Amino acid sequence: GTLAKQLNETGAKLEKVFDELHREHVELEKVERIRKDFVINVSHELRTPLASIQGYTETLLEGAIHDDQNNVRFLHIIRQNAERLGRLTGDLLTLSRIEMKSQRFQFASYYVNPLLKDCIESLEPVAAKKRISLHLVPAPDRTEAFCDSEAVHQMMSNLLDNAIKYTPEDGRITVTAECLNDFVRVGVSDTGIGIPHEDLPRLFERFYRVDKARSRELGGTGLGLAIVKHLARSQGGDVGVESVLGQGTTFWFTLPTNDLGLSEQEAL
Ligand code: ADP
């Protein structure tokens, strides 16, 4: 009787272990697939501008340098693609630093409103070129966030840069800060082209773009939102997006108001 019972219990336990192992195996396969996809994506993204640089350099050396109709145009293409390579390698380096946790964050308490005002001011000249207005709907005075100010600058710069890129001239961008329990929620809303519903779940993946050609044309690397997500999570916050196609998009991120959220993260 007792032996049968013990065997039964052991059997049940083993089944649980097998279940767990199976789950882990599936999870590892998924991680491996994502990693392989990423390497393929990176190679492809780097190869395209590199091929263009090689091609046009070759053409110039083979005589086009004396072709006054085209030589300057070719040089401009070479420069454009070199800049693209620079942006790509820069973004890849940023991402891998965050992922390897070798990026040192300098956490401190900051007043949210002046911090956001600073970020907005840096992008004002870019917005002005398209006559896009930038607005801040501030959090209550003296609302604090426990964060790395450089990281917040980078997140805001990526989100505002996108909002400007994907909003037609004369549009409007509103940054809203509000308190939610132990978090500050920062939203960046635009009156731009919007994002189809089915693309929203994958938007924060590396190299995921709604319209590859449009993104490239606008100088995008497809890594900006992945960087925003990693930076938010590294600071104990999160990110999200809401959008109505043809009307506009709101990206938001949260930051803890004190260091509680963060020490919990470190304890994990
Ligand atoms: P990219 O360098 O291509 O802009 P991101 O990671 O910053 O890469 O953004 C990924 C994709 O999300 C973009 O290619 C674009 O399709 C979409 N996207 C990002 N921000 C916006 C926005 N404010 N409005 C519409 N689409 C956006």
Image (cartoon, rainbow, N blue to C red):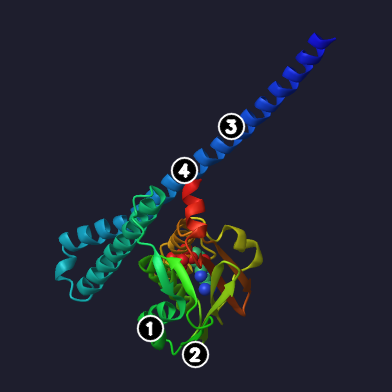
Residue 56 to residue 19: above or below: below
- What's the distance in space between the residues labelled 3 and 1, CA to CA? 48 Å
Numbered disc in front, either 3 or 2: 3
User: The disc labelled 3 sits on which kind of residue?
Assistant: His
- What's the distance in space between the residues labelled 2 and 1, CA to CA? 18 Å
Residue at 85 percent across and 9 percent down: it is 1
Q: Which label number is shown at residue 170?
A: 2
User: The disc labelled 4 sits on which kind of residue?
Assistant: Arg
Q: Earlier in the sequence, mark 2 or mark 4?
A: 4
Residue under label 3, please give it. 25
Numbered disc in front, either 3 or 1: 1
Could you classify mark 4 by the number of other residues whose Cα lies within 10 Å: few (under 14), some (14-19), or many (20 or more)?
Answer: few
Residue under label 4, please give it. 35
- What's the distance in space between the residues labelled 4 and 1, CA to CA? 37 Å
Horizontally, residue 174 falls left or right of residue 115, namely right
- What's the distance in space between the residues labelled 2 and 4, CA to CA? 41 Å
Q: Are marks 3 and 2 in contact (CB under 8 Å)?
A: no
Q: Nearer the viewer, residue 266 or 134?
A: 266
* Tag 1 secondary structure: helix
Q: Earlier in the sequence, mark 4 or mark 3?
A: 3
Residue at 41 percent across and 84 percent down: it is 127
Residue 226 appears at what percent x and percent y?
47, 59
* Tag 2 secondary structure: loop
Could you classify mark 3 by the number of other residues whose Cα lies within 10 Å: few (under 14), some (14-19), or many (20 or more)?
Answer: few
Q: Which label number is shown at residue 121?
A: 1
